[in-house]
Amino acid sequence: MAAAMTTPFVSVDEYLRTSYSPDVEYLDGVIEERNLGEFDHSDLQRILTTIFGVNAKAWGIKALPELRTQVAPMRYRVPDLLVIEATRPRTPIIKQAPLLCIEILSPEDRWPRMEVKLRDYFEMGVPEVWVFDPESRSVIVVKRDGSRTEHREGALTLSGTPVQLSLAEVFAVLDEG
């Protein structure tokens, strides 16, 4: 389970100058490790990145895995995948709310910790977050207004875009073995 590393206060400048492998999140001066997935987490992240990438031009979006995102002046998150408008200028770090953040649960993830992450995204202005659970083959769509909908089948859509993601297609990859 990832927890805050026992390090003293780290400045934003030091965090941004330092290369961590794997990347970490920065929360009010504290470096926090991210729960890294096991095989299903990684495979699901790969297929989502592929599907969004293949459809990026048609959907008018860019999907970017594990990109530092400044959610507040002293808080940086690293979503498993984020989606922005294709026309958005390229910046080293995302500072303007993405259209969508996607998180993939790892076995060690707990909802109370995810709730804090969701709150950070929503305070930044992200309209919705898709939380994929590879174990249950489900997705919880959480919107900024607080609504939550669990999906196990059908397609997910992203308001204001032509994005349409077939859950059968996504989860079939995990079922291939």
Image: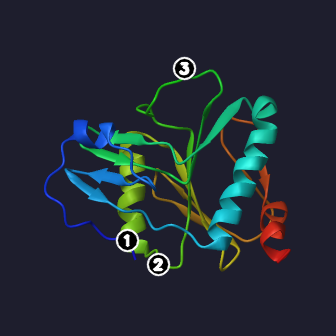
Q: Reading the chain from its start, which is encountered first: label 2 or label 3?
A: 3
Q: Residue at x 71, y 74 (%)?
A: 137
Instruction: Kindly indicate whether the residue at mark 1 contacts the one at mark 2 (C-beta within 8 angstroms).
Output: yes
Give the residue type at disc 1. Answer: Ala
State left or right for residue 173 relative to residue 133: right
- In the rendered image, the quadrant that contains the C terminus is bottom right
Q: Which residue is mark 2?
A: 108
Q: Residue 126: which numbered mark, if any?
A: none
User: What x and y, as percent, mark residue 59?
Assistant: 76, 34
Q: Residue at x 27, y 66 (%)?
A: 4
Q: Residue at x 54, y 20 (%)?
A: 89
Label 1 sits on a secondary structure element that is loop
Give the residue type at disc 3. Answer: Pro
Vertical placement of 121 versus 166: above or below?
above
Instruction: Kindly indicate whether the residue at mark 3 contacts the one at mark 2 (C-beta within 8 angstroms).
Output: no
- In the rendered image, the quadrant that contains the N terminus is bottom left
Q: Nearer the viewer, mark 1 or mark 3?
A: 1
In which quarter of the view is residue 90 placed?
top right
Instruction: Kindly indicate whether the residue at mark 3 contacts the one at mark 1 (C-beta within 8 angstroms).
Output: no
Q: Reading the chain from its start, which is encountered first: label 2 or label 1?
A: 1
Label 2 sits on a secondary structure element that is loop
Instruction: Choose between 75 and 42: the one closer to the eye.
Output: 42
Q: Which residue is mark 3?
A: 89
User: What x and y, as percent, mark residue 70?
Assistant: 36, 39
Vertical placement of 111 versus 165: above or below?
below
Q: Which residue is mark 1?
A: 2
Q: Reading the chain from its start, which is encountered first: label 1 or label 3?
A: 1
* Mark 3: few/some/many CA within 10 Å (<14, 14-19, 20+): few
